[in-house]
Amino acid sequence: MTTKPLMRSAWQIQKSVVFALFLRELKTRFGTYKFGYFWMLLEPMAHVVVMSVLFSYIRGRSLFGIDFPVFIVTGIVPFLLFKNIALRVMDGVNANRALFAYRQIKPMDTFVARTLLDTFLALATAALILLGMAWVGLEVPFRDPFSVVAIMAILVLMGLGLGMILCIVVKYLPEAKTLIRIAFLPLYFLSGIIFPITKVPQEFLPYLLWNPVLHAIELMRAAFFDQYHMLPDISLLFIWMTTLVVLFVGLAWYRTNRNALLAI
């Protein structure tokens, strides 16, 4: 008696594809290096150490009663999460082009796999760094965990949407890739990572407040620290609306250009 092969739904197939791509990305990124997983801590820790040493000479060990290394971590981790997802998704098609010979694998699968991996790495890195800081005696409060998770989720979706847009941009303008990477450097300094927005001169605030990442980082710090003073202009609605627009544009543009992305 023969049995019919088990038919899988489209959702089950896509889930298996994304999981396989996730494992492939993990192995590709860290598997060939003896201390590969250590390097995921290096970038945020380098920022924390350099900025903490620099600012300890300028204004002391704390800021508004907040240990400065903890202050930096609550800014650099969400920023790197957003930046890394956007850039990894941007490179997702070119890095996996050989896999598209299999009809089950679509560009969107690589986008989702890379987004999930960078989200996992960012959360693991933040947890390890904050636990290490608490272990050495720094005060690491965690006032509103729900808001922290919500803000991280918003940045993940914003990074995914922006990454899809950038992926299509570099498909038609390959030379733009270098300029896009460079553009994240001024964004780093304009997102309130190394200074509270309340210290910015009033005449510059209207321009800085157009940056949704700045709003996200300010909300993140307010979710961590009771004593953190946040401007009334900081808006959760603004970053939600920005994320929805960016994600909608990214998905719509991907839908109309998905065949072009696969063309060599």
Image: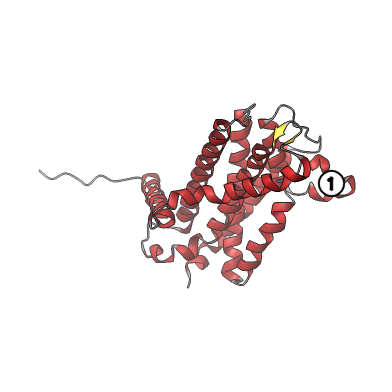
- Viewed as shown, does residue 262 lie left or right of 27? right
Q: Quadrant of residue 254?
A: bottom right
Report how many numbered discs are placed on residues in the image: 1
Give the image's coloring scheme: secondary structure
Q: Quadrant of residue 147?
A: top right
At 69% from the left and 30% from the top, the residue drawn is 225
Q: Residue 56 in the image: state x and y as whole percent.
A: 72, 42
Q: Secondary structure at mark 1?
A: helix
Q: Amino acid at mark 1?
A: Leu
Which quadrant would the N terminus be assigned to in this image?
A: top left
Q: Can the viewer see residue 175? A: yes
Along the line of sight, the residue nearer the viewer: 138 or 218 = 138
Q: Is residue 107 above or below residue 238?
A: below
Q: Residues within 10 Å of mark 1 (few under 14, many from 20)?
A: some
Question: Which residue is at the far right?
Answer: 203
- Viewed as shown, does residue 208 lie left or right of 15? right
Q: Residue 193 in the image: state x and y as whole percent.
A: 70, 46
Q: Residue 54 in the image: state x and y as whole percent.
A: 71, 48
Along the line of sight, the residue nearer the viewer: 4 or 190 = 190
Q: Residue 159 in the image: state x and y as whole percent.
A: 60, 50
Question: Which residue is at the far front?
Answer: 57
Q: Can the viewer see residue 112? A: no
Q: Which residue is mark 1?
A: 205
At 84% from the left and 47% from the top, the residue drawn is 206
Along the line of sight, the residue nearer the viewer: 84 or 130 = 130
Q: Quadrant of residue 106?
A: bottom left
